[in-house]
């Protein structure tokens, strides 16, 4: 009997159906400043995110899918951030987006993500508006907000600098306004005739703008200089203040401080500066948080530098998304949102929660003071900057539902996320 030979197309079809299906790559979009005033904070986000993706892929991915990180440069511009978000979703099929370093960028990017039914995680965005008056169903913020940092700082400053005069130098945009307003509230320095202040342009402030603002501060009778500036703006202003000898006359406060900012200025000039942070690299070792210490050790060994709070935030977001997708059993946005809302977890520090009504991450907030130069340099990577001088638990730091709704009402926004 002659042997019947199947046609080549049929044989190929049989061969292909007998092979295990290849899972589609799961793409995440990182929208961060590769250039501009906040580029150092952006670089830390990138390093933290890539480390998380590498670890997750080595462990089998997310729902069996390997993860790919697709990056875009916001240049610190809100319109660019929104355009990047649209491109990442429309043309590259990303399932989730994250990033920040400017609240205006994060807010604009988050709106573009919502329009396309994607979650956006704020990585470095401290304005109250991000999960407050501008909050919506698709925006989640991993770090603290201006209210939380100001409440922690206010508690410490009120105890140690009561009855002192303050002077505020504030970046003239949503983050700066939020921080100054909140810090004035919690330090009792709302009287601008006694506790004066000036704003500096954003994002295009010149050295002369900081010089002029600091000259006004020097001419005042202030005891505390609150520099509501971030990234390169803070770096330039602190250097000018030091050259003017203001560090000997006033207590300098930088409400939102990061390791990269401290490193840019250096330990001699930063010594004694007080600020707030949602996380610092020495916290896990001092408090015994094993998972946090593993991250610090791995990051330090890989990049030969200590991780900042920006790196920890990006790293945490990737893992939190993975966890939510696996609990939901799908990457479908509505299901992942439900899996996140109200979820409590412990990762790099003590317990945190994705609060359901505003999507703010509830977490402990830390007030830190920059150590003396010799202590900073004693670290292997010359980065032991932060002495933790006060801790405010997350439940005490955040706004209540009533306070959040009052803010939404004032802004003419619905009293629930839409």
Image (spheres, grey):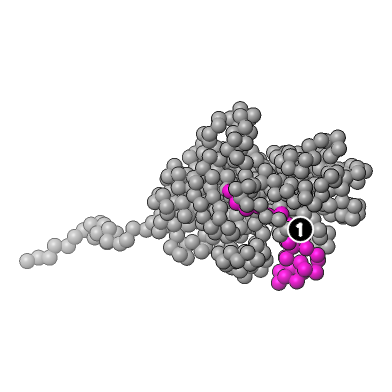
Which quadrant would the N terminus be assigned to in this image? bottom left
Q: Residue at x 71, y 52 (%)?
A: 276
Which residue is under mark 1?
369
Query: Residue 401 at what x, y percent from top left?
Result: 58, 38
The part of the chain drawn in magenta is: 362-387
156 vs 16, left or right, is right
Which residue is at a point 49% across and 49% down the rendered structure image?
343
Is residue 303 something that shows in the picture?
no
In the image, residue 195 lies at what x, y percent? 84, 39
Where is residue 41? Give x, y as percent: 68, 54
Q: Nearer the viewer, residue 117 or 327?
A: 327
Q: Nearer the viewer, residue 112 or 159?
A: 159
Is 24 on the left-hand or right-hand side of 240? left
Number of marks in the rendered image: 1
Q: Is residue 137 above or below residue 63?
A: above
For the point 64% across and 29% down, the residue is 410
- Residue 214 horizontal side relative to residue 375, left or right: right
Rendering coords of residue 267 (x, y %)? 80, 63
Taking depth in this image into account, of 136 and 196 the one nearest to the observer is: 196
Dot 1 falls on a residue whose secondary structure is strand
Q: Residue at x 43, y 48 (%)?
A: 331
Q: Residue furthest top?
A: 412
């Amino acid at each position: 009997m002659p042997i019947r030979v199947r046609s080549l197309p049929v044989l190929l079809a049989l061969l292909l159906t007998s092979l295990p299906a290849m899972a589609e790559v799961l793409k995440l979009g990182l929208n961060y400043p590769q250039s501009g005033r906040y580029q150092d904070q952006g670089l830390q986000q990138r390093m933290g995110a890539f480390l998380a993706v590498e670890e997750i892929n080595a462990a089998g991915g997310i729902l069996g899918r390997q993860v790919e990180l697709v990056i875009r440069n916001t240049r610190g511009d809100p319109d660019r951030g929104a355009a990047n978000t649209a491109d990442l979703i429309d043309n590259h099929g990303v399932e989730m987006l994250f990033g920040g370093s400017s609240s205006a960028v994060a807010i604009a990017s988050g709106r573009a993500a919502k329009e396309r039914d994607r979650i956006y995680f704020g990585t470095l965005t401290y304005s109250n508006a991000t999960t407050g008056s501008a909050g919506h169903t698709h925006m989640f913020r991993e770090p603290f907000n201006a209210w939380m940092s100001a409440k922690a700082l206010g508690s410490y400053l009120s105890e140690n600098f009561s009855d002192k005069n303050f002077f505020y130098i504030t970046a003239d945009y949503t983050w700066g306004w939020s921080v100054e307003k909140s810090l004035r509230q919690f330090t009792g320095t709302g009287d601008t005739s006694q506790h004066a202040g000036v704003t500096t342009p954003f994002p295009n402030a010149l050295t002369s703008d900081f010089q002029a603002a600091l000259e006004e501060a020097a001419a005042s009778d202030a005891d505390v200089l609150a520099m509501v500036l971030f990234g390169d703006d803070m770096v330039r202003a602190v250097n000018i203040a030091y050259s003017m000898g203001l560090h000997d006359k006033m207590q300098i406060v930088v409400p939102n401080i990061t390791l990269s900012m401290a490193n840019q200025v250096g330990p001699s000039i930063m010594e004694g500066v007080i600020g707030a942070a949602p996380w610092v690299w020495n916290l896990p070792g001092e408090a015994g948080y094993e998972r946090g210490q593993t991250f610090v050790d791995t990051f330090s060994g890989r990049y030969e530098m200590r991780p900042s709070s920006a790196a920890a935030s990006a790293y945490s977001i990737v893992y939190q998304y993975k966890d939510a997708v696996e609990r939901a059993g799908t990457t479908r946005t509505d299901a992942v949102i439900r899996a996140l809302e109200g979820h409590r977890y412990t990762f790099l520090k003590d317990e945190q929660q994705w609060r359901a009504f505003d999507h703010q991450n509830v977490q402990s907030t830390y007030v830190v003071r920059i150590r003396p130069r010799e202590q900073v340099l004693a670290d292997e990577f010359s980065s032991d900057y932060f002495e933790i001088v006060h801790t405010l638990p997350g439940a005490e730091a955040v706004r209540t539902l009533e306070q959040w709704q009052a803010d939404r009402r004032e802004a003419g926004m619905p009293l629930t996320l839409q």
